[in-house]
Amino acid sequence: MAGQTYEFYSARAAEAAADAQAATLDNVRDRALRAEATWQALADQARAVAEQRRRIAATKAVENASEAD
């Protein structure tokens, strides 16, 4: 899906952190901090998935090269 990248999620986490810092009400700050934590978890997961996909692609490339020989 478009937009589901580490950069996207990381940017949302940064926005939530800025919202938390600017909040004057405790409940608004808490909500923004929870949002930041959630966005950061999604960013970390997106990064891990992208890395796993790169490793799988590299492994398949090696396998295909060895089969071509």
Image (cartoon, rainbow, N blue to C red):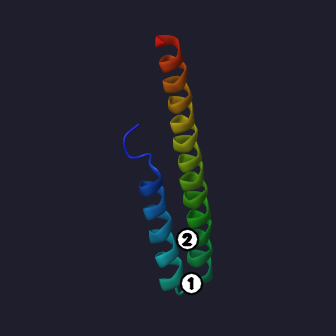
The residue wearing badge 2 is 32
The part of the image, by quadrant, that contains residue 29 is bottom right
| Quadrant occupied by the N terminus | top left
**Coordinates of residue 38 in the picture (x, y in percent):** 60, 58
Residue 25, label in figure: 1
Q: Secondary structure at mark 1?
A: loop
Amino acid of disc 2 = Ala
Q: Find the residue positioned furthest to the left.
A: 2
Q: Relative to 9, say whether 32 is above or below.
A: below
Of labels 2 and 1, earlier in sequence is 1
**Coordinates of residue 25 in the picture (x, y in percent):** 56, 84
**Coordinates of residue 40 in the picture (x, y in percent):** 57, 60
Q: Is residue 52 left or right of residue 61?
A: right
Q: Residue at x 55, y 20 (%)?
A: 63
Q: Residue at x 56, y 36 (%)?
A: 55
Amino acid of disc 1 = Leu
Q: Relative to 54, say whether 25 is above or below.
A: below
The part of the image, by quadrant, that contains residue 37 is bottom right
**Coordinates of residue 2 in the picture (x, y in percent):** 37, 41
Q: Is residue 25 left or right of residue 18?
A: right
